[in-house]
Amino acid sequence: MKHTALSLALLLFFSYFAGAVSAQIPLDAFRLSDIGLGSSARALGMGNAYQSLSDDYSAASFNPAGFGLLKRMEFAGGLNYSKQNNSTTFFGNTTDYSNSATNLNQLSFAFPFPTIRGSLVFAVGYNRDRDFNGAVSFNGFNPNSSMIANNAGDEILYELGLTDQNGNTPIRGNLNQDGTILSKGGIGRWSFSGAIEVARNIYLGATLNIISGSYNSSRDYYETDTKNAYGFNVLTDPADSTTADFREFYFNDVLDWDISGWDAKIGFIYQVSPMARIGASIKFPTSYTIKETYTVNGQSTFANATYLPFQDFQNVSTSEYDISSPYQFSGGASVNLKGLILSGDVTYIDFTQMEFKSGLDAGTMSANNKDIKTTYRGVVNYNLGAEYTIPEVNLRLRGGFIMNPSPYEGDPSERNRKYVTGGVGFLADEAFAFDLAYAYGWWKDIGENYGNNESRTYQDIRNHNLILSVSYRF
């Protein structure tokens, strides 16, 4: 009787290499290079159009030159709630699924040093600027293909009784496929920043970020013979009578990352007039180190047998590798019209500059980096925002819009990520500030369970983010 196990062969693309699997793909580089929604309630309420404003601790995330605008010491902290709703269509069936998380997203201190003229400000703090919350659930009947047939040459499928010893299988489709994918985690930055007014109304700043974070994705996948297409008269392995009447194939895989790294950002702000500012910043490539653990388990079920993982087969692998993100070039301008602030930003990111740097075999790195060049593209993100102050009650009303185009070459506009934002702020005794912001995002996406358009999910995503920030200046 066969020894049975689900080895590391069942990864995203189910490539089996003599017992060792490469779990690293270009999507991993994009996951780390993507832009988050930041950690400041005021900035998010204004659509993150903050390059020329940045007059609070969020300058560490947007434009460190903004620290030069601070005149008093500032303590700040905040919380973030994020939720993703995903309505997934799969072979005509639609399934809703969601995932949410609440995290500390800011804790900071900024200190302006006394100067004879100009300003000199240093700041230190923590920002959580990226969340990896995600959810997918699908269920539908696939008449045309099967993950088993798609990977029939893998030895592990023979060990599970799903093919004969030559890699042949009668299973070609007519199976119900269902599953769930849940992801969680995020990236935080400990930032060390400084800014100086080098000339009248001209501010320069820099930030060094020490990065830590985590990512976890867990997937359950089933193929079930709900219509008895492979009954007692069908043997998946003719040499083994227990493989008659196939019932179900199941696997679970878990990808777990421990993320560390560093990067830096420089910026400037010019106060053109009492009413107008311009600003720009450059974020240098982030150097990430990923410590990865990948775990797989599963089974196959027949009428008279169940094949389970066997202890002689390893189902856990670990690896460590480095990824570099691209440069980010940002610029913006704002005007203050008697209490009404209007602001706009643009950011250019060339995602073809993402790169696997080390830790993987040369062939895998070369293949991934070539795929990045052909799959991704450069994009221009833009942000628009407004804030109106009601002076009688020290209340600030905010609104904004964020557009992050899809980084994939040839993607339709429906896959661009769009957000509308809003927020309120209240200043008490010219010292305590309370800010609340909400962002609603929507876009479409696709996912592949295996192959290319053989088992595709069509996803309609709605994203909700709520940030509460509190600060005290003295």
Image (cartoon, rainbow, N blue to C red):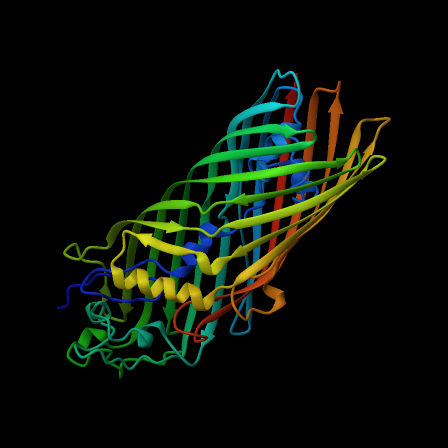
Q: Whole-percent x and y of residue 169?
A: 26, 80
Q: Whole-percent x and y of residue 233?
A: 26, 84
| Numbered label tally | 0
**Where the C terminus falls, by quadrant?**
top right
Q: Nearer the viewer, residue 200 or 281?
A: 200
Check the image and report above or below for 437 versus 426: below
**Where the N terminus falls, by quadrant?**
bottom left
**Is 342 situated left or right of 54 in this image?**
right
Q: Whole-percent x and y of residue 314?
A: 19, 55
| In the image, farthest residue toward the bottom | 233
**Is 233 situated left or right of 351 in this image?**
left
Residue 181 visible here: no
Q: Nearer the viewer, residue 429 or 56?
A: 56
- Figure quadrant of residue 306: bottom left
- Figure quadrant of residue 403: bottom right
Check the image and report above or below for 182 versus 207: below
- Figure quadrant of residue 221: bottom left
Check the image and report above or below for 56 versus 361: above
| In the image, farthest residue toward the front | 199
Q: Nearer the viewer, residue 34 or 285?
A: 285
Residue drawn at 75 percent across, 40 percent down = 398
Q: Whole-percent x and y of residue 134?
A: 50, 52
Residue drawn at 42 percent across, 72 percent down = 176
Residue drawn at 52 percent across, 68 percent down = 409
**Is 391 situated left or right of 278 in this image?**
right
Residue 294 visible here: yes
